[in-house]
Image: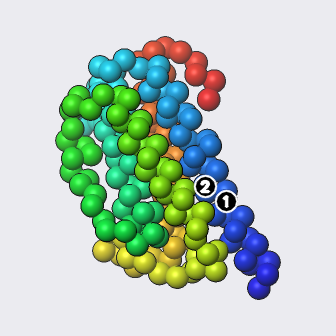
Amino acid sequence: METNNEFAKAYIEWCRFRLLKQYLPRVERCITELTEEEVWWRQHETNNSVGNLVLHLTGNLGQFILSGVGGMKDIRNKEREFSERQGIPKAELIRGLKEALLAADDTLSKLDAARLLDSTTVQGRVRPLFEVIAVVVDHFALHCGQIIYITKLKTGKDLKL
């Protein structure tokens, strides 16, 4: 059992590292490269802007980690994440994302690794905690890549990410 517990601890640490030390700096870098207008640019109405993606990542962290893992009340407004249009300055977007990531990191740092197989309900579906955490890391990676792509598209820069 000790090997499983060590693996579970390593898994939680890896997830925390990916979210806070790899993905957040990439998103921050992209937002600093973009103008306020470019943060909210979308090629078509069916596309998401960087601003919408940041709001979406922030909402996802709250719903899955803070609520699903940490037991806080789920206050997510997913519709707003995608309906917002240029109303939020990029500094505020980053501040909100950082706050959500730091709170999620705190929640994960306190998580007993032995609980990874415990279940929680997120979006009406019962899931083990390890899956909830994996979904967040995978989801963040996906949208981080989109943010990088949009930034490269708008700036023409090789961000070396």
User: Which amino acid, mark 1?
Assistant: Glu
Q: Quadrant of the C terminus?
A: top right
Q: Which residue is mark 1?
A: 13
Q: Residue furthest top?
A: 156
- Which numbered tag is attached to residue 16? 2
Q: In this figure, what is the number of numbered marks? A: 2
What residue lies at 73% left-to-right and 77% top-to-bottom? 5
The answer to which of 139 and 1 lies nearer the viewer is: 1
The image position of residue 18, as x and y in percent, is 61, 49
State the SS at label 2.
Answer: helix
The circle drawn on residue 133 is: none
Q: Position of residue 92 (x, y in %)?
A: 35, 34
Residue 23 x, y percent position in the rendering: 56, 41
Q: Are marks 2 and 1 in contact (CB under 8 Å)?
A: yes
70 and 30: which is toward the camera: 70
In the image, what residue occupies the spot 48% across and 27% down? Answer: 30
Task: Identify the residue shown where x is 46% and y is 43%.
Answer: 98
Residue 33 to residue 12: above or below: above
Secondary element at tag 1: helix
Image quarter in which the N terminus is found: bottom right
Horizontal arrangement in the rendering, residue 93 relative to residue 117 (left or right): left
Q: Quadrant of residue 10?
A: bottom right
Residue 57 in sight: no
Residue at far bottom of view = 1
Vertical position of residue 86 compared to residue 5: above or below:
above
